[in-house]
Image: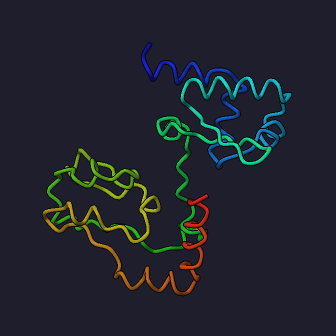
Amino acid sequence: MDKELELFRALCDETRFKIVKYLLTGRKCVCEIVEKVGRAQPTVSLQLSKLEELGVVKSRREGKKVYYFISNQKVKGLLAKKDFSKWKGLDRREIEWYPIIDENKCIGCGMCVTSCGRNVFSFDSERNKAIVANPYNCMVGCTTCSVYCLQDAISFPDKEYVRNLIRKHGLLGKAKTELLKMKE
């Protein structure tokens, strides 16, 4: 059977879907999952076993507890919601970092539109120009689209702006905390 079809079949059960959605937040023991999905422990254990058979989750025993986590990256990709409203805990709309297109230089090649994975750009086919449609989706500090633009039509604020944000809000400490969580 097709692997993608198996994944969708695994997720079409309400209990399994709730379990997987909850596991998007990180590894959990069975007792935590039972509490969150509101099903009896034997039901949750059965569904976790099915998810493990299908290669969606894996388990790890630590003492008396068994912890589950999503092992299938396709499942993570399918279900993860992209929330660009915050950057390192800061309200993204208060950060003045996004691309600016010089319309006189833009030749409408579409490199920025087709290369940005955050849907920052759109294309105005009437004017044959790229436009910044979702400026606050732009990753703070990222200038990749300007590298792709052979016409140098895309610019950003000075990089010192981002460095000052990092200093002002103590973001190095937050980054270290995130790294420690990723190691768990």
Identity of the residue drawn at 45% across and 74% down: 96
Left or right, 103 with reference to 18: left
Labels in figure, total? 0
Q: Position of residue 124 (x, y in %)?
A: 27, 48
Q: Quadrant of residue 133?
A: bottom left
Q: Residue at the location (54% across, 29% down)?
A: 55
| Residue 63: % across, % down | 76, 48
Residue at left offset 20%, top offset 60%? 148
Residue 67's quadrant in the figure? top right
Q: Nearer the viewer, residue 105 or 4?
A: 4
Residue 150, relative to residue 25: is it above or below? below
Q: Give the farthest residue toward the top.
A: 1
| Relative horizontal placement of residue 122, taking residue 84 as reference (left or right) | left
Residue under the point 75% across and 43% down: 29
Q: Position of residue 24 (x, y in %)?
A: 62, 44
Quadrant in which the C terminus appears? bottom right
Q: Does residue 160 lie above or below 179 as drawn? A: below
Image quarter where the N terminus lies is top left
